[in-house]
Image (cartoon, coloured by chain):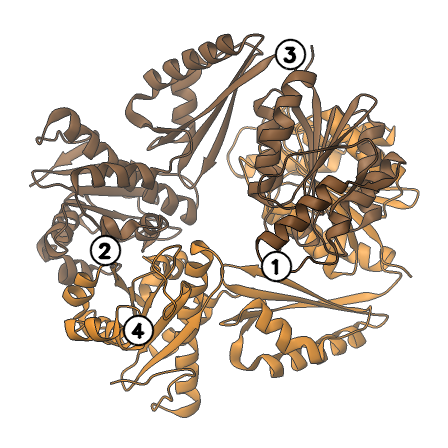
Chain colours: A orange, B brown
Amino acid sequence: MSAPEAVVFVVGDELVDARRNDTVGPALARRLESIGCHVRSRSVLPDNVQAIVSALTQALAAEIDIVLIAGGLGPHEDDRTREAVAQSLGIELELDPKTLHRLEENYRDRGRDVPEGVRRQALRPRDAETLPSPSGTAPGFIVRRQRSLLVALPGAPREADESFTRGVLPLLRRSVAGGQTTATTVLRVAGLLAADVQRALAPVMPNSEAVRVNYLETGGEIELLLSARAQDPDEAQQQLEQVVANFESRLGGHVFARGKQSLTGVLAELLRARAWTLASAESCTGGLIGKRITDLSGASEFYVGGVITYSDEHKVRLLGVAEDTLERCGAVSAEVAASMAQGCRERLRAHVAVSVTGIAGPGGGSADKPVGLVYIGVALPDATRVARHTFGGERDAIRQWSATAALEEVRRALKDMDTLGQRVEPSEPATSLR
Amino acid sequence: MSAPEAVVFVVGDELVDARRNDTVGPALARRLESIGCHVRSRSVLPDNVQAIVSALTQALAAEIDIVLIAGGLGPHEDDRTREAVAQSLGIELELDPKTLHRLEENYRDRGRDVPEGVRRQALRPRDAETLPSPSGTAPGFIVRRQRSLLVALPGAPREADESFTRGVLPLLRRSVAGGQTTATTVLRVAGLLAADVQRALAPVMPNSEAVRVNYLETGGEIELLLSARAQDPDEAQQQLEQVVANFESRLGGHVFARGKQSLTGVLAELLRARAWTLASAESCTGGLIGKRITDLSGASEFYVGGVITYSDEHKVRLLGVAEDTLERCGAVSAEVAASMAQGCRERLRAHVAVSVTGIAGPGGGSADKPVGLVYIGVALPDATRVARHTFGGERDAIRQWSATAALEEVRRALKDMDTLGQRVEPSEPATSLR
């Protein structure tokens, strides 16, 4: 069968002009694509019945297979999705006594007054099927209309995801995918540019319609969203594992996680396993590495702190980099990166220290040392590694890539120690100094 | 007249699942709202002629006043917006010789080969009016169709904005806004929560249809987007200035800029004016303040660096905070914030130092010191100020608000010095320590 078509709507005045950023729509679009749907449009709509009705009516008239709408199911006056769905289908809303009961109980269990709007939350279009809603808020629902499946989901990201996974996905796999099942997974890659990843994967890129590969690049990391569709679940899983194996072999050690784990999370595990501490010494990233590490709650277990040495004077004063080295090699050099990492490790008394020095631009570049040139140092108990990178793009992108690459260099150094024992080989292209 | 209605489409496969974030659509939606249009939907569409045609056809059938579409005007095979517009209008594409000539010249001027796709870029639907395109890439165009104005814009953010401002805005002001003109401005606020701003402004909130106020909250800053519409440009401007004056008087010194300037940019100016340097000492923000400051290229002129002291031990070792103070008052206290700022100022030899210590959560809170409690210290040559804040929300939001509040405290301290001379009053609620 040809791929089913889908449209995604998310409702909220504050999303239209991005006073708040819509994360739910893109997440739902990715989930739909991962099971083989084609997303024909993804829209945000204001809290306006007319606008919602008009959007839904057009989608139904175009016989779109899956019409997803998220948000506007709350207890407030301006939560109008239920009404709009009913109007666009030309059917009535009716009270779902079971849902009302469950919502009321929920408020009471939490010792809170039942709000006036709770009855509104228990309304649903006639013939709609109520979706599971484990977190106890207003549930979504599904209505079938000729070729189309109209699905209304809660607007909060976690609840939308949960409702979709538990209530919608099984149904879509059965009814839309023509009995086929889809196996999905995510590979997370750091330390490579998107172009490098594409080049590396080209020879093993699956050319079957049933296997899909999507890239998502954020803050210097690359996510590979993989899915395989087949009649039989085992077959789908097997296809998927084959792709994973091919990709992993081509990408070497750069796949740092499969699934949701963040690079910092993986690094945290490696450090905790050794009961080791980490410190950072940043120049061009100006605090971004520290910020990334401490995004993780509980980072204090392994991260002791860092220094931001934005001036040469402070590289000398706070990290003990030799003035002579700065003069001879320049602040952006393998030697200074190594010396920063070593100084940081000693002065902050950490087991490992990571350093970054580079040219984030837009100014400050030269033919010898262009904008985007970044050296990363990793000081370990027995060795210091330095890696050289050249990143493209604007200031912000260069800084994000640098921070990711720094965390990745630490991760690889620790992995190599696991493999090679305490003696660690310098990374490539690298300078080993000590 | 009633407000004109608009829809915004942006074209690009990678925008649908947010592999790349769409900034053009929200920006265009805000521009339209700022001149009094109602945006009925904002959508991203894949690079697929059918999907684009279907979206445009529906918008035209619904007699939407302004149909904006951005992107898909490039020289590549998958740039299909021109074709889709022509199909949805049922008219032909024809070559615009002037545009072709200009594009070819442009490539030659830059010493580059004329690409094959250049002829495609010079096509436009019959009767379309070509929009100015100062940066020399493929220009957008406008077509009228009964009640609707269909506008195609380039997809790059800067070019979309420029085309809109120069080619579309004057036309909309004339033809859609019924001859009225709109004056717009932005007030930027820091150091206050959105709820505080709303409470403060409630008594002076304009209740005229002709004046619009939109909020945009990002990373702990609040932008107030203001617009006033009137028949006469002077009248519009006068109305706007009245709103600005009312708002500024209610928000005290918390309006840090009017227009585009960032908080860091304003701070940089204040520091440069005195030829002063800044240093940072961060605990719960873990490097975010340094990151924010160094987002500004050229920050090295005034920012010398900072320390991230995530552990108590490092607050003592790197900043000279007394162990006794840590034990007596706890790491999250006014005393420790003051001591961190003073230690940072002395050890990093800066004119001003800012410190943050707080509980970002989700763990680590208590009844006395809840998650969200944050102390900010500012050490100046003659005084140290400490401010206490309590922020709501999740870990990331608390950290973003803390970083913004820290920069804002430095800005206010410098402003107060300008007003009061070298003696600086402690901020409120505050502890003055020295």
Residue at 19 percent of width and 31 percent of height = B427
Position of A121 relative to A313 (above/below): above
Above or below for B2 versus A304: above
Question: Please, what secondary structure does the residue beneath circle 3 have?
Answer: loop
Chain of the residue under label 1 = B
For mark 4, give the secondary structure.
Answer: loop
Have a look at marks 2 and 4 and say if they share a chain: no
Q: Is residue B231 above or below residue B88?
A: above
The residue under label 2 is B306
Which chain's residue wears label 2? B
**Residue at which label 3 appears:** B179
Label 3 resides on the chain identified as B
**Marks 4 and 3, Cα distance to the nearest angstrom?**
61 Å
| Residue with the mark numbered 4 | A333
Query: Three-letter amino acid code at disc 1?
Result: Arg
The C terminus of chain A lies in quadrant: bottom left
- At which x and y percent is residue A182? 77, 66
Residue B112: image tag = 1
Disc 1 vs disc 3: which is toward the camera? 1
Q: In this rendering, do the residues under marks 2 and 3 share a single chain?
A: yes
- Distance of label 2 from label 1 (alpha carbons): 46 Å
> Which three-letter amino acid code belongs to the residue tagged 3?
Gly
Determine crowd level at label 3: few under 14, some 14-19, many 20+ residues with C-alpha closer than 10 A.
some
